Amino acid sequence: MTAAITRTPPPPDHDTDAEPKGRPFPVRVAAWSAANPWKAVLAWTLFVALCVGAGALAGTKQVVFSDYWIGEAGAAETIALKNGLEAPAVERILITRPGGALDPAAVGAAADDLTAKLNALDEVGDVAAPVTADSGNAVMVAVTMSMPAHEAGDHLDPLLETTAAVQAAHPGLDIAQTGSKSLSSELDDQLGSQLAQVERFTLPITLIILFVVFGSLLLAGVPLALAITSIIAAMGVYALSSHFFPDAGGAVTSVLAMIGLAVGVDYSLFYLKRVREERARNGGTDPLAASVEAAAATAGRTILTSGIAVIVSLAGLYLVDDVIFSSIATACIIVVALAMVSSLTVLPALLVKIGRRIDGGLLARRRTKAAGGGAWSTVLRPALRHPVATAAIGFVVIAGLAVPGLAMTTSVEGRESFPKSLQTISTYDALVAEFPDAGLAHSVIAEVGPADGPALTEAVARLAERTRGNALFVETAEPRISTSPDGTAVRLDLPIPYATSDPRAEESLELLRGQLVPDTIGRIDSAAYAVSGEPAYSADYSAHQAERLFLVVGFVLLATLVIMLITFRSLVFALISMGLNLLASLAAWGALVLVFQHTWAEGLLNFDSPGFIGSRTPLLVFAILFGLSLDYHLFVMSRVREASRRGLEPTAAIRQGILSSASVVTSAALIMMSVFVAFVFIDRIEMKQLGFALALGVLLDALVVRVMLLPALMSLVARAGRWPASWRPRAGTA
C-alpha cells in the first residue's frame, strides 16, 4: 500500500513549488500515518498519556508573590520585604442586625464568642478589640493571620468555618467575613464554577455544529476528540514548562482550553474538507490513503504554516514582561503546537480508519455548488463586481466601530467591579460604608541610613499630618505607622474613601507621589521611598501595559508580514494580510469601549459598568483574535493561490478560492463564537469583556473582512496588474 501511495501523483492544483525535489514534510508524515494507522493512533495515545503523567509527577510551579510587583509599587514592596514591613493578611468580620440598631448585649456575646474561637486557631496571630461604627449599627472585629500575606490564602478555611459557626450560634445577628484573602478565594471559586459551566455548554454546541457540517456523528467527533486530546496533552506539557515559566494561575488553563478548541477544530475541519475534495476529484475510486496524502500537500502544509504563524504572534505576549501574559503565551503556544502536530500525524490515520464513511454529509453534497453558485456566490458578487464601493463600505463599518477605541480607559479590576452576588463583596461594601478607614489605602514605604532614623520618624509624622483635613484621605484616630526594629524603615498606611478606579483615588496617589512624599521624606538625603497599595499597583500596571502595547502590536504585525511574504511571495498581499488581520482587533477594541465604558448595555449583558476596560483585555483580545484571523486568512489565501496556479484568471481564482473555503471557515467561526459568547455570561467583568470582544471580532472577521474587504482588495490588486508572478501556472500545470 505504501508503494502505491508513493507513486500517486499530486492533483494539478497542488502547490509544489516550495519543494520540487521530493515530497513536502506534511505529505511524508501523512503517508506514513495512512500506511500505519494503528501505530499512529497508538503513538499519539501514548504521547498524551506521557504528557499527563509527566505533568502530574512534576507538578505545576506557581509564580512567587514578588513576581507580580511592578513599577513604583513593586519598588515599595521590595523595601517593605527587606525591612520586615510587609502588609499582614487581615480579615475583618462585620456584625450587624437585620433590623438596624444593635442590641449591645447580643453583640457583646457574639463578639466574645468570636474572639475566643479565633484566638484558639493556629492560623490567627491577633484578634483586635471590637470596634463600633459611629452610626452604632455595626461592629467590626479585625483578625490578623499568623503567616505572611502571600501564604494566607491556603490557611483561610479555619477562619471561615469559625465565622460560620458563630453565625449559627447567634441567628439574630448577621455575622460575615471579608478581606482580601477571603474575597479572592470566593471570587476564584465562582470563576472556576462558571468556567466549568462554559465548558459544559461549548462542547455540545461544538459537536452539534460539526454534525451539521459533516452529517455524521462519527466525523463530527474526530475534530472534537483531537482538540480535546491536544488540550489534555498541553495541560501536562504546561505543568512541565511552569518550571521555566511559572504559572500565574487564574484563568490561564481556561484560555489554553479555549485556544486549543479553536485551532484543534479548525485544523481538523480544513484537513477533512480537503480529503473529501480529493475523494470527489477522483470519483472515490482511488484508495482513501491516496486522498489523505494528496490533501496533506495542500491543507497539511497550510496547517503547518498557520501553526507557526499563530505561535509567532502569541510569542509577542512575552514582550509584555508580565508573569500573567508570559503564562498565557506559554500555555497557548504549547496547545497550538500540539493541535498542529495531532492534525498532521494522527488525523490522517483516523481518516483512513473511518473509510468510505468520510464521503457523506452536507459538505460533500454541497461541493458541487462551491464553484458555480449558491448563497455564497451571491454574497461574494458585490466585492468582485464593485470592489471600490465594497471596500469603502467595509472600511466604514470597521472604522465606525474602531474609532471609540481612541477613548479607551484601562484599569486593573478592583473590588468595585467584582460581582455583587458574592457575600464577601457585599460584606466589604457594608463594612466600608460603616468604617471608611477599613477600605483601600496608600502605603508609603521608606528607608534611610542608620543616622537618619529620627529624621525619618519626623518626616513621616509631618506627612501624616499634611493629609489630615484633605477629602482625598480618611482621617484616623492615630496614624497607621509601622517601624522596623532598627528604626531605619517606616510604613505609613493612608486610607482613602474611594474605589481603585475612582479618579479621586488616582488624584490622591499623584498628590502623594508628586508632592507630599518628596516634600517630607524626600528631603532626607539617604532616603529611598515609594508608594504602594491597590490604587498604586493599578496605576503602575495599567501604565506598564500601555507602554508595552505598541511594542507587542508592532512585533506581531512585523512577524505576520514576514511570514505572509515568505508564504505567498507577494509584498502587496503580505501587507493586505497584515492590515486585514489588524482590523478586526481594532473594531473589537472600539466596541469594548462602546459597551463596557458606558451604561447602556448593562441590562442587556447583566453587568455594572466599571467605566473602564480591564488593563489586560486589549492585549489578550489582540493576541487571540489576531491568531485566529491568521488561521482563517491563511486557509482562504491558500485556496485562492491554488486556484490561480490551476490557470484561472485572478477574479475567477479569488471567487473559487473563497467559495471553496467559505463553508468550513464559517463553521469554524460559528464554533468559536459559541465558545466566546459563553464567556459573556460569566459574572467577572473582565471575562465578559474578553468574551464579548472575541465573539464580535470573529463575527466581523467572517462577515466583513473575509466576505467584503479581502475579495475586494484582492480584486483591486488584480485589476492593477499586481497579481503575483509566483501565483501564475507553471508550464504543464494549466
Image (cartoon, grey):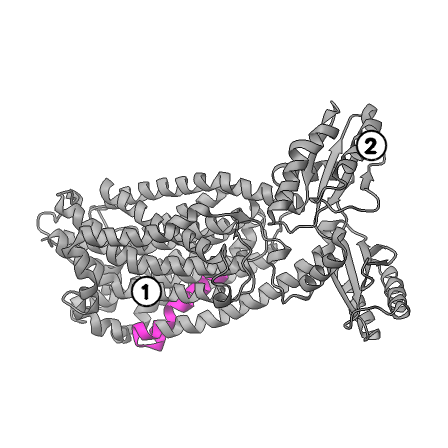
**Which dot marks residue 10?**
none
Residue at 66% in and 43% down: 66
Q: In which quarter of the view is residue 181 placed?
A: bottom right
- In the foreground, 525 or 597: 597
Q: Secondary structure at mark 1?
A: helix
Picture coordinates of residue 364 (x, y %)? 23, 72
Name which residue type carries label 2: Thr
| Residue 8 location (% of width, % of height) | 18, 60
Nearest the viewer among 469 and 386 is 469
35 in relation to 169, above or below: above
User: In the rendered image, is residue 588 in sight?
Assistant: yes
Instruction: Provide residue 290's location: percent of width, then percent of height.
Output: 23, 64
Q: Quadrant of the N terminus?
A: bottom left
Q: Main secondary structure of the magenta part?
A: helix
Sort mark 1 into few (<14), some (14-19) or many (20+) by Cα contacts within 10 Å: many
Element type where label 2 sits in the image: helix
- Mark closer to the chain start, 1 or 2: 1
**Distance CA(mark 1)–CA(mark 2):** 69 Å
Do the residues bearing badges 1 and 2 touch, measured as CB atoms within 8 Å? no
Residue at mark 1: 269
Residue 148 painted magenta = no
Segment colored magenta: 210-232
Residue at position x 84%, y 73% from top?
170
Which quadrant of the view contains residue 40? bottom left
Q: Nearer the viewer, mark 1 or mark 2?
A: 2
Amino acid at dot 1: Leu
Image coords of residue 394 (percent x, y): 27, 54
Residue behind mark 2: 457
Judge from the rendering whether residue 80 lies leftward or rightward of residue 636; answer left or right: right
Whether residue 216 appears in magenta in the rendering, the answer is yes
